[in-house]
Each structure stands twice: as structure tokens, then as C-alpha cells.
Image (cartoon, rainbow, N blue to C red):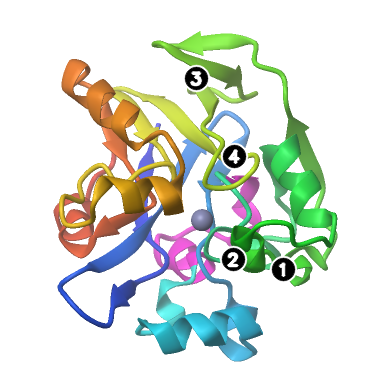
Amino acid sequence: MTLHILNCFTCNARFGNLKTGMVCLLVETNQGLVIVDTGLGLDDYSNPTRFTQFFRVIMDMPFDPNEAAVNQVKRLGYKPEDVRHILLTHMHFDHCSGLADFPHAKVHVHQREYEVFTDKKILHWDEYAYNLRYIAHQPEFVLYDTVDSKWYEFNAIRLPFEPEMYFIPLHGHSHGHCGVAIKTPEGWFFHAGDAGAVYNDQVPAWLIKFVLGPHDQRLRSFMKTHPDVHVVNSHMFLEYFDKEKDRIAS
Ligand SMILES: [Zn+2]
């Protein structure tokens, strides 16, 4: 089993020292390659949506298509069509803009996330980060809403892959947001998506809760009691990727 950690979206604050990339995972499974979140796709680089353009104004983004997941997959020696499945923590632009770069992949996401993404109504500020353009190629979706397992103390939804994987519902940042837990030979890898900022001590807890939802403190406690689990959020400091770039669990 191989798990690559990719940075598919560098996005830095214009002020202060918050320089972050975005954790996307490429995992070899018994069903072919699985990607967890896509980052920005090629179409957003060549023809950015209004929201992406707005983000480029408020944030400092290198906007380098070499960061697109599909280009990183190729550099690792795979073909885009080797990617058979994409798991989405949620459907904000920076997590699913690259779906069309993998037209052969089935897209797995929580049902509530899909419903809110496709209902064309904006009832909450976070939904401005949704754009139906990212599914214009009409990928096949696999939707989940039934908790059927426990993963440690978290409610979990078993995903149909080996190695063992779960969606961990952590709703709040978006309606159907989920983390993804993956069993690796070195122990559990827990991608908690945008449900927290567990390595960030520069941003006050109230602001984290406002933007990312109610789970950050719980995730921090979980990390203390389970130091054997490798926990990440989507937006990690750039040093993390330097440290982990050769991480391959096999
Ligand atoms: Zn988000």
C-alpha cells in the first residue's frame, strides 16, 4: 500500500506568516488509485471562476498549474485514468475544482454535501465556494449518509476499499463535511479536512470555530490521547509538506 501526500493548493495570507498548502492524498488501494480531495484543477488555472479570482486577490497564491493533482499524478509515474475514485471531504472550490481532470473516477462524498452543492441556493456564506462547473463533466457519484461503524470514538462510514478507510462525519464547516481515516502499515492516517486547524496556534479559537465549525477542540484532544494517529487538516503549513514529501507508507 502506498500513500502520497500532495500539496495541491498553496494559499498564503497577505499579512503575517501564514503560508499553507493543501493536503491531497494519493492512495493505492485494491480498487486502483484513490485521491482524497483534488485541489485546483487545470480548468481553474486557465479559466478561473469568479470566486477563484476573488481568492487570488485576497490571498497570495502562486497559482502554479504544476500543483494541479493531475500533473502531480503524472510526475509520480501514473496515468490520470489510473485514478478510479475520488473522496471529497467537502465540495468547496479548493477541494473539488480538479474533478474534471479525472473523468474516469467515481466521486465519493457525503449525501448532504452533494445536496447542498447541487441545490443552487445560497443560504450560508460558505456556499459561495461551491460551483456547479466542477461537475459539468457529470461524474458518477457515490453518496453516503448512514453511519455504520465507529472509528475510535467517532461515528464513521465504512468506505468500500482496502486498506480499511472511513468517512468520519464532521459537519459544520460545510453541511456534509467529512474527514477520512485510512489504515496504513504505520498506523492510522486521519485527514480531518477543514474541520479544524490543529497545528495552528496563531488564530484564536473563536475564529477557528466560526470558519471551520465546532470540531477543532475535539480533534486537538483526540491527538493528545492518540499520538499514534497521524492527524492532518487540509490547510497545513508549507513546512509540513517539505517534511512529509517523501512519505510513502508501504
Ligand atoms: Zn472548505
Q: Which mark sits nearer the N-terminus, 3 or 2?
A: 2
Does 76 appear in magenta? yes
- Amino acid type for the residue under numbered disc 1: Asn
Q: Is residue 35 visible?
A: yes
Q: Is residue 36 magenta?
A: no
Q: Which mark is residue 32?
A: 4
Q: Secondary structure at mark 1?
A: loop
70 vs 72, left or right, is right
Expressed as whole percent of the image width and height from the top left, the position of residue 89 reads: 55, 44
Going from the N terminus, do you reach mark 3 or mark 1 first? 1
The correct choice, above or below, for 12 with respect to 138 in the image is below
Circle 1 residues within 10 Å: few <14, some 14–19, many ≥20: many
Helix, strand or loop at mark 4: strand
Mark 3 — residue? 164
Mark number displayed over residue 93: 2
> Which quadrant of the structure image shows residue 214?
top left
Magenta extent? 69-88
